[in-house]
Amino acid sequence: MNPKSGPSSAFIGASWAALFAGMLTYLIGLWNATMALNEKGYYFTLLMYGLFAAVSLQKTVRDRIEGTAVTGIYFGLCWLSLASAILLLTIGLWHATLAPSEKGFYAMSFVLSLFAAVAVQKNVRDTLAQSSA
């Protein structure tokens, strides 16, 4: 990326669209699911935890690249949090009494949301860096 240019409008729009599409489909799936409320809460919490962990890890990696001090323990916790969210979703879906297509639906919308959250955070940071330069 050229220091004077930030992310394109198309990439910013696509990132936000992917984030909303992933989150919205995941949440609509939960809303319409016939599972118990505590199960819905589990999957909702995993989505929120996963999004936070992915954004936090992306920020930490970027901080290290740019020379900002990041402690090793925080960096490790970011990786552990993201891995935990993915592992907990995998275990939950493995043992869920859902059709395989429903399990795939939740897995794919979760992964799309994580990827898009990282892209959105990158775009926000790049845009801020561009405007302050």
Image (tube, helix red, strand yellow):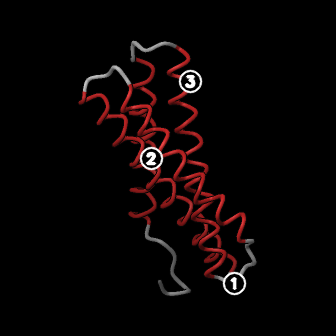
Q: Are marks 2 and 3 in contact (CB under 8 Å)?
A: no
Which sits in the foreground, 44 or 1? 44
Q: Earlier in the sequence, mark 1 or mark 2?
A: 1
Q: Position of residue 131 (x, y in %)?
A: 65, 75
Q: Crowdedness of circle 2 by 10 Å Cα count: few (<14), some, many (20+)?
A: many
- What's the distance in space between the residues labelled 2 and 3, CA to CA? 17 Å
Q: Is residue 1 above or below residue 88?
A: below
Closer to viewer: mark 2 or mark 3: 3
- What's the distance in space between the residues labelled 3 and 1, CA to CA? 39 Å
Q: Is residue 62 above or below residue 93?
A: below
Q: Secondary structure at mark 2?
A: helix
Q: Residue at x 50, y 21 (%)?
A: 39
Mark 2, residue position? 113
Image-quadrant location for residue 22: top left
Amino acid at circle 3 = Gly
Q: Residue at x 39, y 12 (%)?
A: 34
Amino acid at circle 2 = Ser
Q: Crowdedness of circle 3 by 10 Å Cα count: few (<14), some, many (20+)?
A: few
Mark 3, residue position? 41
Q: Earlier in the sequence, mark 3 or mark 1?
A: 3
Q: Earlier in the sequence, mark 2 or mark 3?
A: 3
Image-quadrant location for residue 107: top left
Q: Is residue 66 above or below residue 127?
A: below
Q: Residue at x 61, y 68 (%)?
A: 125
Mark 1, residue position? 67
Q: Secondary structure at mark 1?
A: loop
Q: Quadrant of the C terminus?
A: bottom right
Image-quadrant location for residue 122: bottom right
